[in-house]
Image (cartoon, grey):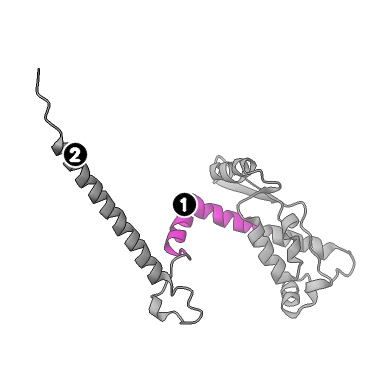
């Protein structure tokens, strides 16, 4: 995990020209938390600035993971926090509304909760990637392929209705390619047999 974090999240992000994005998928978790707690999802870009750091400790027996997110923009008063479902989530977290004695305290605590969720997501995704589970999951559940037989799909709007036509066209193209290859081989064989054999001098 430490090696993968260095290669992917740090070096990989630097090579990609990332600004503040030295992480695996912090924006995914943060945006989900923003929607659930009534935050402004338009602020997910600047709020997702995150550096994920991992190091081995205790003679390499344990993993220390940290996330640094210096610009999370959240609030617990007004905006989407007044909506029923979002307010209920804040209530469950004990962070709904303003703190009675310390203004901004609830917002700071919410930012820490979001950072903790991001850290859990980083550990989960990086572990899956290191173990090879991520690739296997993508191969097994690839959404670009229909997961159920076509006849069970609804006829409207029938997004997969054209698959049979496309498959037939691809098969026709492949058959034409094979035919051309066979013709080229036959032509090459005729040319070879037409050449006079060379004798030794």
Give x and y (percent) for residue 138: 47, 60
Q: Where 155 sits versus 37, above or below?
A: below
For the residue pair 55 and 181, the one nearer the viewer reads as 181
Q: Which residue is mark 1?
A: 131
- x and y percent of residue 83 in the render? 77, 78
Q: Main secondary structure of the magenta part?
A: helix
Q: What is the magenta range?
A: 117-143
Examine the image and state in which quarter residue 39 appears: bottom right
The number of numbered discs placed on residues in the rendered structure image is: 2
Of labels 1 and 2, earlier in sequence is 1
Q: Is residue 33 above or below residue 68?
A: below
Q: CA distance from mark 1 to mark 2?
A: 55 Å
Kindly indicate the quadrant of the structure image that contains residue 200.
top left
Residue that appears at 19% across and 46% down:
186
Quadrant of the image containing the C terminus: top left
Badge 1: residue crowd in 10 Å (few <14, some 14–19, many ≥20): few
Image location of residue 191, percent across then percent down = 19, 39
* Dot label at residue 85: none
In this view, the residue farthest toward the top is 201
Residue 97 in the magenta stretch? The answer is no
Residue depicted at 70% across the width and 61% down the height: 114
Q: Residue at x 55, y 56 (%)?
A: 125
Disc 1 secondary structure class: helix
| Residue 104, above or below 188 | below
Which residue was labeled with disc 2? Answer: 191
């Amino acid at each position: 995990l430490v090696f993968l974090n260095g290669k992917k999240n740090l070096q990989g992000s630097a090579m990609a020209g990332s600004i503040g994005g030295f992480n695996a998928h912090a924006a995914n978790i943060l945006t989900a938390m923003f929607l659930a707690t009534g935050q402004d999802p338009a602020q997910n870009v600047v709020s997702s600035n995150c550096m994920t750091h991992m190091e081995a400790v205790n003679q390499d027996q344990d993993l220390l993971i940290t996330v640094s997110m210096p610009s999370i923009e959240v609030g617990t008063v007004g905006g989407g926090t007044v909506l029923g479902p979002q307010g209920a989530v804040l209530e469950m977290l004990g962070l709904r509304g303003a703190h009675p004695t310390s203004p901004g305290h609830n917002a700071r605590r919410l930012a820490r909760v979001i950072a903790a969720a991001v850290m859990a997501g980083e550990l989960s995704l990086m572990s899956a990637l290191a173990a090879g589970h991520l690739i296997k999951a993508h191969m097994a559940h690839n959404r670009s392929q229909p997961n159920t037989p076509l006849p069970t799909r609804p006829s409207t709007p029938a997004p997969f209705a054209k698959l049979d036509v496309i498959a037939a066209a691809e098969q026709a193209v492949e058959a034409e390619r094979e035919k051309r290859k066979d013709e080229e081989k036959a032509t090459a064989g005729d040319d070879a047999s037409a050449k006079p054999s060379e004798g030794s001098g």
